[in-house]
Amino acid sequence: MKKIMLSILAVVAFGTANAQDIKFGVKAGANFSNFTGDVDSDGLTSFYIGGLVDFAVSEKFHVQPELLYSMEGAKDAEMSFVRIPIMAKYYVAEGFNLQAGPSIGFKVSADDGLDEVTKSMDFGLGFGAAYELPIGVFFDARYNLGLSDISDVNGFELKTTNFQVGLGYRF
């Protein structure tokens, strides 16, 4: 865990030290989430909301740390996380970028019963794309793949999966 946190801090520090342009922003949207592993559940439609900082390392490459509140889980098994994704963004065309990066999530709450059998942290990877208008408005879509087993029950695997569609504003 220490290695993960140090890696995240190094990426942010590198982006800050070499940034040519820094922009702040807000974003929100819909979550389509579910669990994978040793569970058969129906997906949950919910929301996420948060803020971001965009560091332009070069014209085509940006680093974007985010702080998001995210409602996730499955029907009858809801959880909420504070997620910190750190996305590397590569601009393939004017206003259009592809994104990928790690995400760490801290459990804020969970339905009764679920809270007692799940760990307090989640780690995953996000992959997505966004289109930004010159006025600062952007539209994005991202798939978040949970890599860590959040089950606290021996012999039972539980991972998160999540697709997000949203919009935001960079100022």
Image (tube, rainbow, N blue to C red):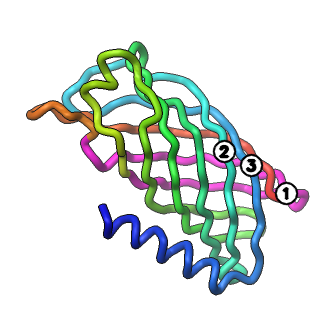
Q: Is the C-beta separation of discs 3 and 2 under 8 Å? A: yes
Mark 2 surroundings: few (<14), some (14-19) or many (≥20) residues within 10 A: some
Q: Earlier in the sequence, mark 3 or mark 2?
A: 3
Circle 1: residue type: Gly
Query: Is label 1 in a helix, a strand or a loop?
Result: loop
Image quarter of residue 157: top left
Q: Which residue is mark 2?
A: 50
Query: Is label 2 in a helix, a strand or a loop?
Result: strand
Query: Is residue 142 magenta-colored?
Result: yes
- Horizontal side of 108 relative to 114 (left or right) equals right
Q: CA distance from mark 3 to mark 2?
A: 6 Å
Q: Which residues are magenta?
A: 124-149
- Name, please, the residue furthest toward the right: 135
Circle 2: residue type: Gly
Q: Which residue is mark 3?
A: 26
Image quarter of residue 121: top left
Circle 3: residue type: Val
Residue at 40 percent across and 72 percent down: it is: 6
Q: Nearer the viewer, residue 41 or 114?
A: 114
Q: Main secondary structure of the magenta part?
A: strand
Q: Earlier in the sequence, mark 1 or mark 2?
A: 2
Residue at 50 percent across and 74 percent down: it is: 11
User: Which quadrant is home to the C terminus?
Assistant: bottom right
- Horizontal side of 120 relative to 144 (left or right) equals left
Residue at 80 percent across and 51 percent down: it is: 169
- Horizontal side of 45 relative to 19 (left or right) equals left
Placement of 40 over or under 16, stated as above or below = above
Residue at 33 percent across and 19 percent down: it is: 41
Query: Is residue 63 magenta-colored?
Result: no
Q: Which residue is mark 1?
A: 136
- Horizontal side of 71 relative to 171 (left or right) equals left
